[in-house]
Amino acid sequence: MKRALISVSDKTGIVEFTKGLVQQGIEIISTGGTKKALDEAGIATLAIDEVTGFPEMMDGRVKTLHPKIHGGLLGRRDLASHMDAMKEHDIQPIDFVCVNLYPFKETISKDGVTEEEAIENIDIGGPSMLRSAAKNFGSVTVVVDPKDYAIILSELKENQETTLATRKRLAAKVFRHTAAYDALIADYLTKAVDEAEPEKLTLTYDLKQSLRYGENSHQNASFYQSAIPVPFSIASAKQLHGKELSYNNIKDADAALRIIREFDEPTVVALKHMNPCGIGSGKTISEAYQFAYEADPKSIFGGILIANRPIDLKTAEEMHKLFLEIIVAPDFDQEAFDLLATKKNLRLMQLDFDQMKEDNSPETVSVLGGLLVQDQDLVTEVSDSWEVVTDRTPTEEELKALSFAWKAVKHVKSNAIVVANERQTVGIGAGQMNRVGSVEIALEQAKDKMDGAVLASDAYFPMDDSVEYAANHGIKAIVQPGGSIRDKDSIAMANKYGVAMVFTGGRHFRH
């Protein structure tokens, strides 16, 4: 008689699955809560200690780590020496293993969980049985996911056994499962001991969705979410309406979410191709949207919008006039949602903004053959700490505009220049190979909106040409990090034109 060992923490569908195995003449071995559930369902089971002849001990820590279990899993049916050893030591083969693991992820995700609770939810026997069974997939069927119960029962009914292809596929799934489980444990303990640069980096992600394609139609792509979800992320946003997100949508939305974190007042970020095309702040979200729109009415077309306040009908009526890809907000008033939802392809996303500034985990970027890891750029330099380096000090109004521009410029691709007033960006120069090129682009865009405008640069000016160009085009105040060997030249040029300039002491490259 064939045997199945069943021990699960997630009991979804386990009674029905086990009944299906019994109908195929398979004897059931079980443990703890799983055995109790099966017994209550009227399914005859053997206890682990009946198989091992050894009692469970140490609060269940030691029960399945026994030769009669692992010998029954690992013994190769095609090797006479293995079968002889099993017979000599009274070890019966175990042909099916259905195990899922102690809920470590769920435990550490709870508020206030103690280290003792976390450690007690590290499963040892479960992964050991899974790995033993998966290694011997030539003979043993191993299942860790309730979604796979049906295929096993189907093949048993049709062929009285599972196919090698199915067993191999399930074995691969098991090793992915145990690897992810171990990665979470490794990450938890690594953080517990404040290991900043471990010699091995173990990351695990869950498939969130398959994408139609990547950056281009000939590229395959998928979207994975971190195993412990980050609440304020596009991966955690709830899609309320519209077609599925694309690869480029996801990258753009992520970039916009990083920007919106800088602002506490009602703010709207409009973004295209990983760069903001307009940022507006106001007393209401409607006013903020209007400022973001007016910042660049041309580029916002086909872009995405992030708002840090619920969208009301007044704001929705203005947004509805445009072709937009995505709108992300904490919520949508019902009338606003109904209006925007008349555009069948517009993605409407709801996201919890209450946890906007809680995540400080490192960010990763893939390169060919490797992975770069760095802290997020969460540094916010306040204007009180800035150094005025010119003869003229910024006015109070200029200082407000400089603060706004400085928040924006750290999220524009370098070399980055932002021209802004205290409520909106009016010119953005992004990603140019020389800084004066970005200055020229930003000021060309801002030429009709220079009232109260100031200029921010994400890094220092290597030459004084950018300062002179800005001064000649109406800029009266500049914020930049400072730190160039030619800072004195830039300061002298600013003084020549009566431009106020402040140094923040912090650079914000965004590559």
Image (cartoon, rainbow, N blue to C red):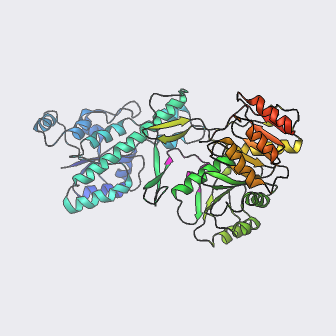
Q: Residue at x 61, y 38 (%)?
A: 376
Q: Nearer the viewer, residue 82 or 255?
A: 255
Quadrant in the picture for residue 69: top left
Image quarter (top left, top right, bottom left or bottom right) of the C terminus: top right
Magenta span contains residue 412: no
Left or right of 307 on screen, residue 11: left
In the image, is residue 477 above or below residue 256? above
The residue segment tinted magenta is: 225-237
In the image, residue 371 lies at what x, y percent? 48, 38
| Whether residue 399 can be seen here | yes
In the image, residue 158 lies at what x, y percent? 21, 63
| Whether residue 42 can be seen here | no
In the image, residue 263 lies at what x, y percent? 74, 47
Left or right of 385 on screen, residue 129: left
Q: Nearer the viewer, residue 258 or 273?
A: 273
Q: How many labels sit on residues?
A: 0
Magenta span contains residue 233: yes
Q: Nearer the viewer, residue 471 or 352?
A: 471
Q: Main secondary structure of the magenta part?
A: loop
